[in-house]
Image (cartoon, coloured by chain):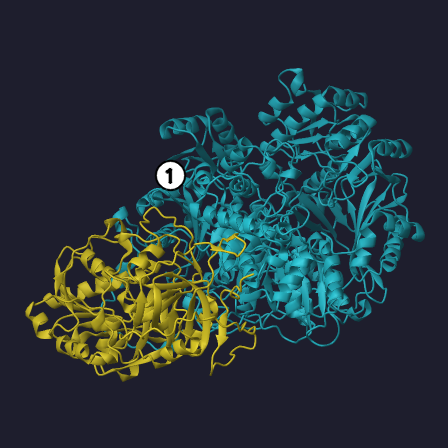
Chain colours: A cyan, B yellow
């Protein structure tokens, strides 16, 4: 890359001036404007649910060859690396970027090969790339795929840190050179310069930019020396090459410093940590930069963090555009960003640069840059309407920005900087409650699991909308029952000072209790501009509190709504109901207007209906009278509700669009594909509340509303919405009938969720379920438990998704649970059910049409026994140990239940099969489930698409999907858990879901598929070494089997005394080892010394053991030793190791499995001889 | 309870001749503003304004009849556009009645630079960025010694300032300079009108005694095309430029070891043009717009700069004549108005654009190198390249509409840009243009 500059004063807006000056006043031939061809939009992808019963997965049209403009010399086939499973710090924003990249490159006529282990992504749909590999993404396996596919180029900038690290490994090992694959988008030196802390600092020095005083340590000693040199705590520790700052943190004292350094050194890909002077309290900004191969650079968006430095930007509340910079200061950051992308040498594509600005004197320091698309770039794309990933993909094949038309205006080129005439607020969503033991404190290591974004014409409006988009029980900011109001000053001040997920509510409480902007600023360092805006909201609330609803004039209501207050908040303040507020508001004519996101602040006409609400004068929505359907999305990602539901929503949109409906998407999650403006015909970027949905319904009056694809979010509001459309007798805009909720009726959904109604139905159908009862008091619970016998599963009836669910083995534990974990009273009963020991759990996805036909989509067998939340359990499709008889029972019960509940669309059922072969129904959910994308990919039929068509009235017969598909290959899904991010919490699996993502392995045998899934999930499966066994009494009877299994695989066995004794009795050689509390050397020492390669630990639950066990499990996690916490997991792991020992891992593209499964014999033969 | 005005930003009524323009438009609420029975005030004798210096107390809470304070101000101002729409708003800064041409600016930052850019004389600037005033006002960001624009139209006036350089609030600043501002209007809706209909004449008024129809008449009678606005903004006498801005904001220094003497014609010159030339090693003499060419040539300058300025280039034939007398004799550089005057001096034509270019995000392609700069733009008129003589070449085009954005005529030692290489506000991408001008002067010395 170009010029490097030596001193700060020479920082130039465009370092390539030398080149430019050469053009000085030399007469040039007149260049015609027409030389900039706008690329032809070659054949769009066709997404079609096959109606003729044919091959459902491979319907697509790809252009034959790359178009002329933007052709990369000698490149025909491009490999794209995905981001793998959803983990904290790497969520579905990379599905969004990867999907855009696949589409953009396929559109240009390139052959696209995609690798991603995550089956829940849209990008791994077999019709988005020519070749799709769903499987592990380790360097050797990817190298093998490259060998088989021989792509000409590799695009590593779309799959987050995972893809970047993978590309670095492949390049460093020489694999890319050997196979003649060029890296496009970012070169190896550029990735290194951006990712290696030392190189980055040097690069910044070269262009005269300041970075925080720091040093790089590779050992603890070096780290300590650096700390002495910098001189003062707090210090920030950042490991190199990790995503979301894993292993990093802020150290306020020496002990903490040592601890964080140790974790950081272990987490870093390169055993490097950066120790940095803390800039706590400085303002933090991010700029999204794009550069093309002609060295044109544009800034897409500036983002200002409300949380000042010290909180990971992914965990910060952020606002776009930057609000507190003058032009001179902003342009300085712009100049720096441009200089940085050039100096680092990102030849083309998007990057993001983070700056810290001293609020006292404007001093700027560069924090970091990511030479790839990122979470921030997804946010910036949604915030501005400029599709960064799509553009980056086109730039990577040689387009220049001025050759690509702006997607939204169509007439102007993409070489411009979006101007926005609204404010965007993003608020992260956290899940600390799922990880007891970890403190809810925000640091430089990212901990949020999702985010909501909202647009409004002002900061206040967008902020309030973002708060209510979070779906954490708040109807906006303040103006409701806020628990912080009951806190004392000490607690409030602590919450203001120490960044935490609820800090905004502490700010509210502080204002309410009379603290001023100045004081809050001093404690929290949050910029006064934001605090003053928030203070005004409190003033407005005070005003509202002084009025009754009918005292509020039209102008009053307008002013309040313009500040983002929801009807619910107004109702709270005026002691009325939400529907009263709505009626009064509508009666006075105070309705929202919808403004369009157009990248250009209305300077040019926008053709893209990407809208947000605001209380303004002019509404630009322009709804049509077409037949249309509104799809309600899933809102912010959270544990248990994430990308899988977005997948379903997008598929519904694709399928219904294809079927001739206008599709309207409504969602508040900026990371998703569903909020891409070209996924649906129209997009409303809005909170998913009754009020906001009703507003859109009033305006659009769609024929159908789809609520069953977005997870709990739309289901929760289905009943009130049903009520709203019934009360208003809403006629659809197309004039063909009433506005209706499509698919299974809200009443049926309720029937499945209401324990009483559901029990009655099951009784009627003769479907068995585990014995149990509803307890309204402690004595109730004890009585039920003694009747059905321990162990029992207990859970609150009013919470879904496994929250606070526990397996209890005796009275004492039950009493403790009822006293601590939940409240039990007549209002909030607790469910007590028989826990089936060692039962096998089964997940079924089924599809039913309005004519009452039911087809099983897939039957999955869980690897872990019943009792582990289905979302955390690995599973296999088809099943492997279930008898044909049991499967028949399951099939007929599922069909009967679907018919009885009048399901129209998808239904998910969970069954348990006891050791004696009895089948019990555990749960039935008449909606799309988390497993739909996995099943769709395993069987090769897009279930969500079928379901959406079925809801529109098509029958399964018409779709050609009339019988269950049992594939010849085996697909295994494995969950990926975020324990590394949550210090101090135990990693044992339980009935409460805690995984953030999933991976898939496909093979012709279970063991191979399981091995692939394990590797993809990040388990380092070693083929030999020492296994540590420690099994509790409940599981000891399986010990011999496990011990013998590992022995046969050639492992040495070590075990704690009790376990060792059993093994010795069985005649299995074992070396005893001390438990931690028994003295030294103990298991912990061996683990630290690298003497243990695999661990199998099941919890025994007694106090001492759970303390010991917890320590060991956390340690195993830190040292990245595979740890297995269930007997079934151990069995499957042994199978996998055996399989890995016997044969190498085969890599086949998704398309191969279906061709082989469905195509003629000679194709099969051809495939078998292929490498 | 008291009759409170209706929605904040809705046009209060559609006046005669106004047509509803968009199918998706909600019907504007049609509440008329009650005019206090004061009778008409005599109309101002000056074409531009009737201003009264009254501080309006922006965020002053308004009291409801039962003594409870509203945390917002009630509407007290109107914007009446020549298309017949009237928009209720809240005033800040000066009050009174003012007529001007409404233009929108899409810059996200730099409202202070825009306020002090003399090119906006006679115009109301509507900022599309909804939050204005966040960083207050500071002495370093002034682009001229005064505010020449007619008024400021924004969506939201910041209720506080947050910036380490801030010295006063935007409202205090506007009151001192007697400039009217309004906020709480649907600026996006007005921008869309301007995009569709082109720039519109509007009247801003806090005067409740005037009816909307009167204001509409004022708007419809007022003309900006063909009006010499330059004479109102240029300096009175020549002076040597010396800069007092904090050098921290010099983004590029020590560009040249040689010193060049540049005479800059002040058609409404922005300070940053002079700052940039200074940092490239120029000594600058600024002369008024009507300064005779002969006097300038007597100074034997290394180059002459024709600055930016307000209004219609066709309205200032004396300036065109001056340019004609100078070009070909010394190297010249024209910026914005200067570029248009050069176009006319070469015998070319200028025309009024539909709604002009005002913003900091326009892509400009240097046709010589193919490179694309993001540029700051502020003009309503453009040069028609087809009308230029043989030898004059279009060097830059605006990629949004392919309009002419830069010229050169090597034989005449002439270069000019339609946009603002000095930025302020805006990106610094085109700063190289000053380097080109230096090279031009250098090669002329040899």
Q: Is residue A525 left or right of residue B292?
A: right
Q: Is residue B404 visible?
A: yes
- Where residue A881 appears, as percent x and y from the top left, is 83, 45
B350 shown above or below A273? below
Q: Nearer the viewer, residue B283 or A824?
A: A824
The answer to whether any part of residue B392 appears in the image is: no
Residue A953 placement (x, y as % from top left) = 78, 70
Percent position of residue A1144, x then y: 66, 45
Residue depicted at x 73% and y 58%:
A720
Q: Secondary structure at mark 1?
A: loop
Question: Image height check: is A250 above or below B224?
Answer: above
Image quadrant occupied by the N terminus of chain A:
bottom left
* Residue shown at 90% from the left, 42% from the top: A917
Left or right relative to A878: residue B66: left
Image position of B289 with respect to A376: above or below: below
Q: How many marks?
A: 1
Residue at the spot of label 1: A212
Q: Name the residue nearer the viewer: A774 or B333.
A: A774
Determine whether, in the image, residue A517 is placed left or right of residue B43. right
Q: Residue furthest left?
A: B298
Front-most of residues B132 and A1002: B132
Instruction: Give the class, few, some or many, for how many residues have Cα within 10 Å of label 1's Cα (few <14, many ≥20).
Output: some
Give the quarter of the image for residue B350: bottom left
Closer-to-camera residue (B394/B137) = B137
Residue A188 x %, y %: 44, 49
Label 1: chain? A
The quadrant of the picture occupied by the C terminus of chain A is bottom right
């Amino acid at each position: 890359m170009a010029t490097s500059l030596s001193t700060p004063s020479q920082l130039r807006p465009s370092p390539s001036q030398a080149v430019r000056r050469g053009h000085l006043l030399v007469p040039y031939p007149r260049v015609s404007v027409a030389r900039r061809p706008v690329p032809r939009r070659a054949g769009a992808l066709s997404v079609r649910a096959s109606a003729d019963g044919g091959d459902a997965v491979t319907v697509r049209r790809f252009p034959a060859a790359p178009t002329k403009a933007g052709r990369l010399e000698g490149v025909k086939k491009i490999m794209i690396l995905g981001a793998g499973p959803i983990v904290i710090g790497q969520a579905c924003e990379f599905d969004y970027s990867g999907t855009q990249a696949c589409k953009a490159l396929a559109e240009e006529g390139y052959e696209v090969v995609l690798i991603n282990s995550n089956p829940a992504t849209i990008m791994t749909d077999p019709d988005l790339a020519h070749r799709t590999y769903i499987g592990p993404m380790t360097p050797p396996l990817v190298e093998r795929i490259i060998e088989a596919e021989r792509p000409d180029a590799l695009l590593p900038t779309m799959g987050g840190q995972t893809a970047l690290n993978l590309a670095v490994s492949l390049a460093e090992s020489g694999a890319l050179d050997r196979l003649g694959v060029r890296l496009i988008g970012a070169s190896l030196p550029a990735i290194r310069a951006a990712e290696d802390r030392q190189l980055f600092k040097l690069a910044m020095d070269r262009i005269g930019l300041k970075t925080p005083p720091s040093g790089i340590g590779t050992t603890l000693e070096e780290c300590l020396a650096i700390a002495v040199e910098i001189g003062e705590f707090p210090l920030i520790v950042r490991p190199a090459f990790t995503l979301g700052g894993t292993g990093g943190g802020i150290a306020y004292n020496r002990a903490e410093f040592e601890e964080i350094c140790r974790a950081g050194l272990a987490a870093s890909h390169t055993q490097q940590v950066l120790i940095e002077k803390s800039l706590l309290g400085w303002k933090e900004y991010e700029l999204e930069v794009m550069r093309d191969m002609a060295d044109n650079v544009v800034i897409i968006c500036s983002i200002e963090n409300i949380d000042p430095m010290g909180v990971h930007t992914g965990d910060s509340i952020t606002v776009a555009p930057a609000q507190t910079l003058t032009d001179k200061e902003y342009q300085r950051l712009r100049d720096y960003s441009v200089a940085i992308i050039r100096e680092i040498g990102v030849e083309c594509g998007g990057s993001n640069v983070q700056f810290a600005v001293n609020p006292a004197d404007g001093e700027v320091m560069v924090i970091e840059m990511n030479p790839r698309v990122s979470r921030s770039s997804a946010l910036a794309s949604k915030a501005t309407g400029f599709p960064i990933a799509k553009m980056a993909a086109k730039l990577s094949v040689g387009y220049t920005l001025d050759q690509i038309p702006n997607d939204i205006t169509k007439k102007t080129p993409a070489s411009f900087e979006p101007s926005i005439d609204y404010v965007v607020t993003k608020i992260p969503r956290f899940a600390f409650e799922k990880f007891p033991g970890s403190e809810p404190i925000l640091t430089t290591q990212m901990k949020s699991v999702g985010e909501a974004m909202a647009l409004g014409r002002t900061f206040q409006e967008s902020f309030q909308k973002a708060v209510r988009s979070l779906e954490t029980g708040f109807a906006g900011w303040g103006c409701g029952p806020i628990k912080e109001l009951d806190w004392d000053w000490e607690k409030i001040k602590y919450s203001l000072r120490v960044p935490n997920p609820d800090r905004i509510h502490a700010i509210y409480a502080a204002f309410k209790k009379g603290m001023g902007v100045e004081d809050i600023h001093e404690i929290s360092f949050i910029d006064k501009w934001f605090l003053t805006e928030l203070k005004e909201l409190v003033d407005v609330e005070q005003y509202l509190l002084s009025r009754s609803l009918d005292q509020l004039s039209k102008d009053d209501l307008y002013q309040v709504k313009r500040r983002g207050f929801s009807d619910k908040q107004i109702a709270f303040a005026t002691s009325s109901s939400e529907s009263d507020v709505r009626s009064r508001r509508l009666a006075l004519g105070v309705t929202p207007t919808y403004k369009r996101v157009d990248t250009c602040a209305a300077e040019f006409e926008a053709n893209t209906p990407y809208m947000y609400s605001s209380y303004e004068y002019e509404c630009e929505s322009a709804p049509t009278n077409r037949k249309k359907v509104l799809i309600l999305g899933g809102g912010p990602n959270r544990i248990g509700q994430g990308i899988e539901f977005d997948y379903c929503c997008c598929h519904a949109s694709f399928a219904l669009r294809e079927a001739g409906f206008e599709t309207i998407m409504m969602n508040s999650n900026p990371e998703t594909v569903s909020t891409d403006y070209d996924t649906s015909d129209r997009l409303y970027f809005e909170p998913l509340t009754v009020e906001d949905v009703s507003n859109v319904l009033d305006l659009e009056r769609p024929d159908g509303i789809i609520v069953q694809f977005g997870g709990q979010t739309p289901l929760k509001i289905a009943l009130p919405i049903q009520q709203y459309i019934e009360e208003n007798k809403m006629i659809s805009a197309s004039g063909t009938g009433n506005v209706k909720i499509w698919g299974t009726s809200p009443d049926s959904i309720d029937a499945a969720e209401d324990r009483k109604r559901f029990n009655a139905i099951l009784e009627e159908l003769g479907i068995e379920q585990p014995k149990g009862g509803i307890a309204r008091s402690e004595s109730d619970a004890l009585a039920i438990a003694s009747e059905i016998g321990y162990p029992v599963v207990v859970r609150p009836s009013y919470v879904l998704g496994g929250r606070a669910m526990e397996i209890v083995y005796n009275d004492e534990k039950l009493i403790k649970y009822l006293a601590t974990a939940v409240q039990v009273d007549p209002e909030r009963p607790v469910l007590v059910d028989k826990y089936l020991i060692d039962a096998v759990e089964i997940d079924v996805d089924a599809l039913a049409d309005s004519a009452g036909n039911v087809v099983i989509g897939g039957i999955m067998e869980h690897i872990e026994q019943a009792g582990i939340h289905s979302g955390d359990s690995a599973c296999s499709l088809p099943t492997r140990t279930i008898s044909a008889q049991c499967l028949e029972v399951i099939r007929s019960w599922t069909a009967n239940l679907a018919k009885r509940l009048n399901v129209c669309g998808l239904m998910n059922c969970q069954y348990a099969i006891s050791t004696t072969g009895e089948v019990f129904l555990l749960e039935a959910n008449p909606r799309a489930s988390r497993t739909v994308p996995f099943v769709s990919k395993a069987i090769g039929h897009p279930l969500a698409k079928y379901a959406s068509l079925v809801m529109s009235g098509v029958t399964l017969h018409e779709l050609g999907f009339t019988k269950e598909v049992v594939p010849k290959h085996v697909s295994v899904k494995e969950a990926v858990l975020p324990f590394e991010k949550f210090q101090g919490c135990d990693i044992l699996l339980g009935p409460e879901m805690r995984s953030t993502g999933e991976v898939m392995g496909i093979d012709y045998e279970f063991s191979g598929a399981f091995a692939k899934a394990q590797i993809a999930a990040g388990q380092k499966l070693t083929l030999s070494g020492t296994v540590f066994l420690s099994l509790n009494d409940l599981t000891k009877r399986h010990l011999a089997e496990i011990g013998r299994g590992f022995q046969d695989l050639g492992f040495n066995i070590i075990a704690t005394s009790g376990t060792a004794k059993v093994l010795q009795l069985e005649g299995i050689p074992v070396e005893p080892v001390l438990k931690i509390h028994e003295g030294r050397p103990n298991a912990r020492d061996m683990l630290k010394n690298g003497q243990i390669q695999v661990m199998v630990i099941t919890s025994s639950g007694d106090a001492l053991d759970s303390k010991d066990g917890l320590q060991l499990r956390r340690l195993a996690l830190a040292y990245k030793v595979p740890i297995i916490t269930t007997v079934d997991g151990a069995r499957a792991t042994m199978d996998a190791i055996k399989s890995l020992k016997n044969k190498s891992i085969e890599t086949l593209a998704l398309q191969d499995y279906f061709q082989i499964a469905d195509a003629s014999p000679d194709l099969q033969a051809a495939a078998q001889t292929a490498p | 309870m008291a009759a409170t005005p209706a929605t904040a930003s809705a046009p209060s009524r559609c006046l005669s001749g106004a047509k509803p323009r968009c199918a998706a438009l909600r019907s504007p609420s049609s509440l008329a503003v009650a005019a206090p029975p004061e009778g008409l005030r005599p109309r101002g004798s000056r074409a531009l304004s009737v201003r009264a210096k009254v501080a309006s107390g922006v965020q002053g809470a308004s009291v409801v009849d039962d003594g409870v304070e509203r945390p917002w101000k009630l509407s007290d101002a109107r914007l009446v556009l020549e298309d017949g729409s009237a928009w209720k708003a809240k005033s800040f800064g000066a009050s009174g009645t003012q007529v001007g041409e409404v233009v929108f600016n899409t810059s996200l930052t730099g409202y202070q630079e825009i306020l002090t850019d003399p090119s906006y004389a006679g115009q109301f600037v509507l900022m599309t960025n909804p939050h204005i005033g966040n960083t207050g006002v500071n002495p370093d960001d002034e682009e001229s010694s005064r505010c020449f624009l007619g008024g400021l139209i924004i969506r939201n006036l910041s209720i506080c300032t947050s910036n380490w350089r801030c010295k006063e609030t935007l409202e205090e600043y506007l009151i001192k300079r007697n400039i009217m501002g309004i906020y709480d209007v649907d600026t996006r809706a007005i921008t869309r009108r301007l995009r569709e209909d082109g720039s519109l004449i509007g009247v801003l008024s806090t005067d409740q005694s005037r009816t909307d129809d009167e204001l509409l008449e004022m708007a419809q009678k007022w003309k900006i095309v063909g009006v010499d606005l330059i004479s109102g903004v240029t300096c009175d006498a020549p002076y040597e430029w010396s800069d007092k801005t904090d050098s921290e904001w010099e983004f590029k220094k020590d560009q040249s070891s040689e010193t060049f003497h540049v005479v800059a014609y002040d058609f409404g010159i922005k300070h940053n043009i002079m700052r940039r030339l200074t940092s490239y090693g120029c000594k600058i003499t600024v002369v008024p717009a009507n300064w005779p060419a002969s006097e300038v040539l007597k100074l034997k300058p290394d180059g002459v700069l024709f600055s930016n300025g307000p209004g219609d280039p066709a309205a200032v034939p004396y300036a065109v004549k001056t340019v004609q007398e100078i070009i070909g004799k010394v190297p010249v550089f024209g910026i914005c108005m200067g570029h248009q005057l050069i176009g006319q001096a070469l015998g070319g034509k200028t025309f009024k654009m539909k709604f002009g270019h005002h913003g900091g995000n326009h892509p400009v392609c240097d046709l010589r190198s193919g490179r694309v700069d993001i540029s700051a733009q502020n003009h309503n008129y453009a040069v028609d390249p087809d009308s230029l003589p043989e030898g004059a070449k279009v060097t830059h085009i605006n990629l949004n509409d392919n309009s002419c954005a830069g010229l050169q005529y090597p034989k005449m030692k002439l270069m000019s840009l339609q946009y603002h290489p000095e930025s302020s506000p805006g990106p610094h991408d085109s700063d190289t243009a000053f380097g080109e001008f230096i090279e031009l002067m250098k090669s002329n010395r040899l």
